[in-house]
Image (cartoon, rainbow, N blue to C red):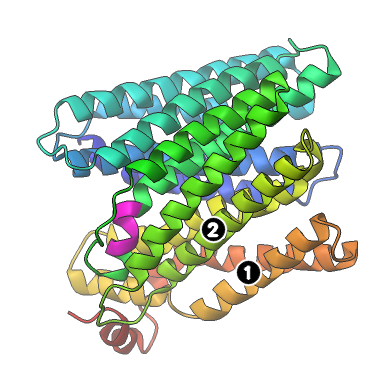
C-alpha cells in the first residue's frame, strides 16, 4: 500500500483526537489546565494529524507525483500521534521531561512531513500550483518553529514570566495562524471549487500568499521579541493576506453552478468569515493597543481556533470522508447526501453559539450567554463529528436515493 492509502488512518485518528478534545472539557478546570488541554488535543491532535495526511495526499495529487512509501508515511503517522499524546499526558501531570520527549517526537514527525512533501515536489510532473506549495512550505516552517518554542516552554526552560508569556504568544501564532491557517489557505485554492463543483476562478494569489507568510513571521517574531510595532505590522499584513484569500472565496462562490451548495461548502465559507473577521480584529487590537495580544487571547482562540480552523476541518470531513469511501459511485453519492441531513441548522446554530462565545470573550455579553453559546456550538460540532463517523449508515436511511439525486446528481 502506497502513501495515499494511509489517508484513512489519518482521518480516523483526527476524529478520535477531536472527540477526546470535546470530552476533556468535562474534566475539572485544574485537571485540564483551563483551556490548554482541549486546545492542545484539537490542534496538536486533530488538526495536525489530519493536516499531515491530507498535505501528503494533496501534494502528490497536485504535483502529479508518486505518493511517499508506506514505511515513511507510517513513521510520520506514529511520530506525530505519539508526540501529541506524550505532551497531553506530561503537561497536566507536571512532568517536564515527558513534555520535552513528546515535543521532540512531534517535531520529528513534522520534519519528516516536510521532507516527504519536498521529495514529492522534486518529483513533480505538474508545477503549476506554486502558490499552494509556497503556503505549504511556509506552514511547515511555522510549525517547526512553533514546536521548538513549545518544547522550550513545556520543558520549563524559560523562567522569566514576561519572556514566558511572549514566547507562548509566538507559539500560539505559529501553530494557529502559521501551520493551520497557511495550510488551509493553500488547500482552499483548489478544494473550495471542488466542493462547490465549479471551475476554479482566475486568481493571482502570490501577493496574498506572501502577505500571509510574512505576516505570520513578523507577528510571531514581534511577539517573541516584545517588539510591538513589528507584531502590529505582521498582524496587518496577515489580515490583508486573509482579505486576498476571501476575495478568492467570493469569486469561487460566484462562479456559475448547477447544483445546491453542500453543507461542507457552507462550513468552509462560514469558517472563512471567522478567519477574516478574527484577523482584522487582531490587527485592529494590536495597532490600537500595542502589546495587548495576551489580553486578546480568548477572542483569538474562539475566532481563529474554533471558528476558522476547527470549522474548516469539520466542513472538509463532510466532503472528504464520503468521497473517499470505496465502492460504487452511487454509494458515495448517498453518503454525501447523508451528511446534508440537518446541515443548515447545524451550520447556523453552531456559528450563532460561537458568536455568543466571541462576544462574551470581548466583554460584550454576560458570561452566562457565553457559556450557553459554548455548549450550543459544541452540540452543533458534535453533530457534524457524529455524521463524519456515521455517514455510511445514514446513507441507508429511507429517502437517501432521493436526497442524492437532488444534491449530487450524476
The dominant secondary structure in magenta is helix
Q: Quadrant of residue 192?
A: bottom left
Query: Residue 274 at x, y = what percent?
Result: 58, 59
Q: Quick one: label 1, few (<14), some, or many (20+) residues within 10 Å?
A: many
Asked if residue 301 can be seen in this view, the reply is no
Q: How many other residues sit within 10 Å of disc 2, few (<14), some (14-19) or many (≥20)? A: many
How far across and down, in percent of the image, does residue 3 sit? 25, 35
Query: Which residues fall within the magenta stretch?
Result: 189-194
Q: Position of residue 29 (x, y in %)?
A: 85, 43
Q: Quadrant of residue 158?
A: top right
- Residue 108 visible? The answer is yes
Q: Is residue 267 magenta?
A: no
Side of 252 where 99 appears, left or right: right
Q: Which residue is mark 2?
A: 311
Residue under the image location 27 percent in, 25 percent down: 118
Residue 190 covered by magenta stretch = yes
Position of 157 relative to 245 (above/below)? above
Dot 1 and dot 2 residues touching (CB under 8 Å): yes
Residue at 67% x, 15% y: name it.
Answer: 152
Q: Position of residue 223 (x, y in %)?
A: 68, 27
Residue at image mark 1: 350
Image side of residue 143 versus residue 204, left or right:
right
**Foreground of the two, 33 or 386:** 33
Of residue 110 and residue 80, the one placed in the foreground of this image is 110
Residue 96, which numbered label? none
Amino acid at each position: 500500500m502506497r502513501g495515499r492509502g494511509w489517508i484513512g488512518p489519518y482521518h480516523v485518528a483526527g476524529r478520535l483526537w477531536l472527540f477526546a478534545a470535546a470530552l476533556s472539557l468535562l474534566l475539572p478546570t485544574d485537571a485540564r489546565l483551563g483551556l490548554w488541554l482541549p486546545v492542545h488535543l484539537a490542534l496538536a491532535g486533530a488538526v495536525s494529524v489530519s493536516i499531515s495526511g491530507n498535505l501528503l495526499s494533496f501534494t502528490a495529487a497536485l504535483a502529479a507525483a508518486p505518493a511517499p512509501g508506506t514505511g515513511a508515511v507510517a513513521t510520520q503517522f506514529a511520530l506525530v500521534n505519539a508526540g501529541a499524546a506524550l505532551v497531553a499526558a506530561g503537561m497536566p501531570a507536571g512532568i517536564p521531561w515527558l513534555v520535552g520527549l513528546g515535543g521532540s517526537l512531534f517535531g520529528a514527525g513534522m520534519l519528516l512531513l516536510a521532507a516527504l512533501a519536498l521529495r514529492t515536489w522534486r518529483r513533480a510532473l505538474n508545477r503549476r500550483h506554486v502558490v499552494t506549495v509556497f503556503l505549504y512550505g511556509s506552514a511547515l516552517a511555522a510549525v517547526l518553529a512553533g514546536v521548538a518554542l513549545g518544547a522550550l516552554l513545556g520543558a520549563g526552560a524559560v523562567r522569566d514570566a514576561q519572556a514566558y508569556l511572549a514566547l507562548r504568544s509566538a507559539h500560539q501564532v505559529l501553530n494557529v495562524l502559521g501551520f493551520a491557517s497557511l495550510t488551509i489557505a493553500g488547500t482552499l485554492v483548489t478544494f473550495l471549487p471542488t466542493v462547490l463543483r465549479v471551475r476554479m476562478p482566475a486568481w493571482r494569489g502570490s501577493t496574498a500568499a506572501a502577505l500571509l507568510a510574512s505576516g505570520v513571521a513578523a507577528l510571531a517574531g514581534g511577539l517573541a521579541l516584545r517588539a510591538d510595532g513589528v507584531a502590529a505590522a505582521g498582524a496587518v499584513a496577515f489580515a490583508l493576506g486573509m482579505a486576498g484569500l476571501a476575495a478568492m472565496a467570493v469569486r469561487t462562490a460566484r462562479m456559475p453552478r448547477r447544483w445546491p451548495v453542500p453543507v461542507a461548502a457552507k462550513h468552509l465559507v462560514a469558517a472563512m468569515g471567522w478567519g477574516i473577521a478574527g484577523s482584522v480584529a487582531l490587527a485592529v487590537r494590536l495597532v490600537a493597543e500595542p502589546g495587548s495580544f495576551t489580553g486578546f487571547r480568548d477572542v483569538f482562540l474562539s475566532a481563529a481556533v474554533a471558528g476558522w480552523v476547527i470549522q474548516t476541518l469539520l466542513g472538509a470531513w463532510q466532503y472528504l470522508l464520503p468521497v473517499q469511501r470505496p465502492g460504487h459511485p452511487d454509494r458515495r453519492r448517498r453518503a454525501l447526501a447523508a451528511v446534508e441531513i440537518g446541515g443548515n441548522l447545524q451550520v447556523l446554530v453552531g456559528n450563532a453559539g460561537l458568536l455568543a462565545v466571541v462576544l462574551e470573550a470581548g466583554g460584550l455579553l454576560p458570561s452566562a450567554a457565553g457559556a450557553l453559546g459554548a455548549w450550543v456550538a459544541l452540540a452543533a460540532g458534535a453533530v457534524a463529528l457524529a455524521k463524519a463517523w456515521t455517514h455510511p449508515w445514514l446513507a441507508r436511511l429511507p429517502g437517501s436515493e432521493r436526497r442524492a439525486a437532488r444534491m449530487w446528481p450524476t
